[in-house]
Image (cartoon, rainbow, N blue to C red):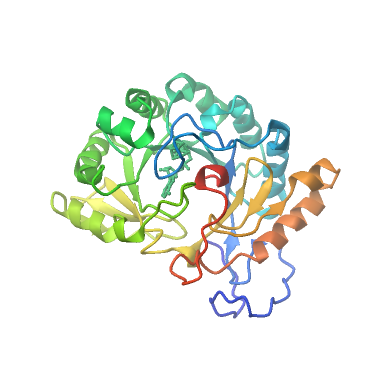
């Protein structure tokens, strides 16, 4: 990560005076971090209902006129790449494959200079039909979410009977060369927490890189319970029963996953301990929601509207300044452990995971 030393202690205090922002072209914050990785949510809708993410009935979807058009998404990403130093763009949601214009958006973004790396976080449903067109459009890689290998459990977790579609999507990503194919898994106590080893074995056999993510308090139902969460330490313990794990000595940088070589490598497994091993001090993310709001963090309480100014005719420079100022105010950390922690009002699916 590029960072700038500002000599400011890394504490998050509302009483601290807000220092003046130095003249810096990038997305610098008060703690010296510079965001270069942009997460763009393309929709808040989804064809699954993972219990840790969405309620069974879904949510009140965002009205169509509030959602950014394809051209608006491309314009905002262009500003981020050309003026603000963004070098990686990841499309997410909700389910980004539900966005019809995805191939066109990817093509336009991978034509920008300097060309950013472009990736997708998806549940994989429908990817088998679109992987080739997406790769042709310039998509570099995918992360596919897979929490279980058992069809009945898949239905219990996601409330839909779609495991075979997800597995087809995964294998299409691998044959289309969207490498490295990464798999995201959330383990839930007494639901799929006995699958850490089978999931790792499945991924090792196919050359996918598995990453376990600690469950975070970002579900719409507010059902997260820290005492019931499967922690990074617990996942390590379970995996160590079957595999020899060694910390990958390659520099982790701003990557959220702690990477471990499996049985001497080169295959590896990642553990994203967002709650128990936070990596906020190295965070290089900035976020854009499907309705054109900037967020400096998944857990931000505030958002900065860029859709309104853009539709009112704001030039690129003005939008770039709005973005710089939004990121300058980024908090030092997510604050999940603070006594006054308040879960953000938008759930993960509406922010973009
Ligand atoms: N629908 C796509 C998918 O499932 O990959 C993209 C959006 S989803 C919100 C992105 C990632 O966030 C998925 O890997 C999902 O497992 C993860 N996720 C959702 N809710 C979560 C939560 N409460 N805690 C941790 N991870 C969560
Ligand atoms: Fe949909 Fe992804 Fe949330 Fe599951 S985790 S409900 S696939 S947005």
209 is higher (above) or lower (below) than 278:
above
Would you identify the image quadrant in which residue 31 lies? bottom right
* Displayed-image quarter of ligand 2: top left
Describe residue 126's horizontal placement relative to residue 211 as left or right.
Answer: right
345 is higher (above) or lower (below) than 160:
below
Describe residue 59's horizontal placement relative to residue 209 as left or right.
Answer: right
Residue 25 placed where, x, y %?
71, 61
Q: Residue at x 19, y 53 (%)?
A: 238
Describe residue 247's horizontal placement relative to residue 64 as left or right.
Answer: left
Viewer-side residue, 269 vs 333 = 333
In the orientation shown, which residue stands out farthest toward the top? 129
In the orientation shown, which residue stands out farthest toward the left? 241
Q: Residue at x 86, y 43 (%)?
A: 313
Q: Residue at x 71, y 37 (%)?
A: 66
Q: Is residue 127 visible?
A: yes
Would you identify the image quadrant in which residue 308 lies? top right
């Amino acid at each position: 990560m590029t960072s700038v030393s500002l000599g400011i202690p890394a504490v998050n205090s509302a009483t601290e005076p807000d220092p003046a922002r130095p003249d810096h072209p990038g997305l610098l914050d008060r703690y010296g971090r510079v965001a270069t990785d942009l997460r763009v949510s393309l929709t808040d809708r989804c064809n699954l209902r993972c219990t840790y993410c969405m309620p069974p009935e879904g949510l009140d979807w965002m009205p169509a006129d509030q959602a950014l058009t394809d051209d608006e998404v491309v314009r905002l990403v262009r500003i981020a790449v050309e003026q603000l130093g963004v070098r990686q763009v990841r499309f997410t949601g909700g389910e980004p494959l539900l966005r019809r214009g995805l191939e066109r958006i990817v093509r336009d973004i991978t034509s920008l200079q300097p060309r950013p790396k472009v990736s997708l976080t998806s549940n994989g449903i429908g990817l088998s039909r679109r992987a080739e067109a997406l790769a042709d459009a310039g998509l570099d890689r995918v992360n596919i979410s897979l929490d279980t290998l058992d069809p009945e459990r898949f239905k219990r977790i996601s409330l839909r009977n779609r495991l075979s579609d997800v597995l087809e999507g995964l294998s299409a990503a691998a044959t289309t060369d969207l490498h490295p194919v990464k798999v995201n898994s959330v383990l839930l106590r007494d639901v799929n927490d006995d699958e850490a080893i089978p999931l790792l074995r499945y991924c090792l056999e196919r050359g996918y890189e598995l990453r376990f993510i600690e469950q975070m308090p970002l579900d719409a139902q507010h059902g997260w319970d820290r005492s019931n969460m499967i922690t990074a330490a617990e996942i390590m313990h379970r995996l160590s029963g079957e595999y020899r794990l060694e910390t990958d000595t390659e520099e982790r940088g701003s990557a959220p996953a702690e990477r471990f070589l499996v049985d001497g490598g080169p295959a590896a497994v990642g553990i994203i301990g967002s709650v128990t091993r936070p990596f906020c001090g190295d965070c290089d993310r900035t976020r854009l929601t499907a309705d054109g709001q900037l967020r400096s963090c998944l857990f931000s309480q505030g958002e900065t509207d860029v859709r309104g100014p853009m539709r009112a005719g704001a030039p690129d420079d003005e939008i770039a300044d709005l973005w710089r100022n939004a990121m300058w105010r980024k908090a030092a950390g997510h604050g999940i452990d603070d006594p006054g922690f308040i879960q953000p009002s938008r759930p993960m699916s509406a922010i973009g995971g």
